[in-house]
Image (cartoon, coloured by chain):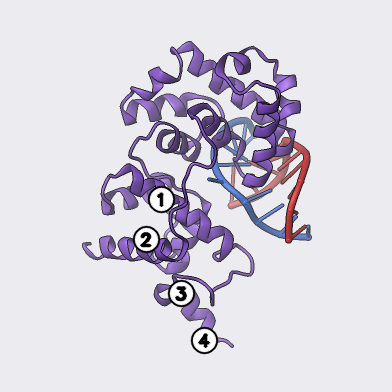
Chain colours: A purple, B blue, C red
Amino acid sequence: MKKMREILEKVFSLLYSRFGPQHWWPGDGELEIIVGAVLTQNTSWRNVERAIWNLKEAGLLDLDSLHKISVEELAKLIRPSGFYRIKAARLKELIKALVDSGGIERFKRMGIQELRGRLLEIDGIGPETADSIALYAFGKPIFVVDAYTRRIFSRLGIFEGSDLSYQEVQRFFMENLDHDVMKFNEYHALLVRLGKTHCTKRDPDCPGCPLKAICSFFKERSLCD
DNA sequence: ATCCCGGCGT
DNA sequence: ACGCCTGGAT
């Protein structure tokens, strides 16, 4: 399937020429990215920003402080991000794992598969969160799959019907794109951008979509007007 | 009312 | 496959 490489490049160039570089991850520092990756689970980034701001203002956005703070106290601070009790517990698990295995620098030095495996062992860290951390916090060449990715490529007609697993979708991208960190970074960020502004779940803006020329969903919709 | 850069337990 | 976790924006 040589064709898929061309399609993925086409999608990228259409998105990039419309939206430009996305400068991800939004927020600085490895720890802030790690924390943000957990807080944004099924939650809009706007709400995550408030939670992170609370942690910053309290002067707690460092490994040591987060390790010492109680779950209850942490839960209060991250309240605006929603699911705050379970997320506080998940953050504590993650922080504990980071501290116990020798800090962030130690994780950073791991190979991609070892790092991914370690993260997935932590309760509350699933494939998307693990890959977000691997790519955006540690600069590992791995493609992040999310709900937007699935929706956009289903509508394009590329994942049509087939109910693919996370791994299968990820393999599709990684087999058809160069393993370049900046490319993976920008590609995922651009898909999120499109998912928010045009390819929304309800009432998508197909006429204004940069991908409409190659989208089967748009073609189907255009027939009934 | 419905959704948001998911993950877990049943 | 489904219910749950939760606040905030639209």
User: Which disc, if any, is residue A186?
Assistant: 1
Q: Identify the residue shown where x is 28% and y is 62%.
A: A4
Amino acid on which disc 1 is placed:
Glu
| Residue on which disc 2 sits | A12
| Front one among A76 and A28 | A28
Amino acid on which disc 2 is placed:
Phe
> Residue lying furthest left in this view?
A2
CA gap, disc 4 and disc 1? 33 Å
Is residue A158 found left or right of A200 in the rendered image? left
User: Which disc, if any, is residue A212?
Assistant: 3
- Which mark sits nearer the N-terminus, 4 or 1? 1
Q: Are marks 4 and 3 on the same chain?
A: yes
Residue mark closest to the camera, 4 vs 3:
3
| Residue on which disc 4 sits | A223
Secondary structure beneath dot 3 equals: helix
Is residue A79 found left or right of A39 in the rendered image? right
Q: Are marks 1 and 3 on the same chain?
A: yes
* Circle 1 crowding by C-alpha within 10 Å: few under 14, some 14–19, many from 20: many
CA gap, disc 2 and disc 3? 13 Å
CA gap, disc 4 and disc 3? 14 Å
A99 vs A52: above or below? above
Q: Are marks 1 and 2 on the same chain?
A: yes
CA gap, disc 2 and disc 4? 26 Å
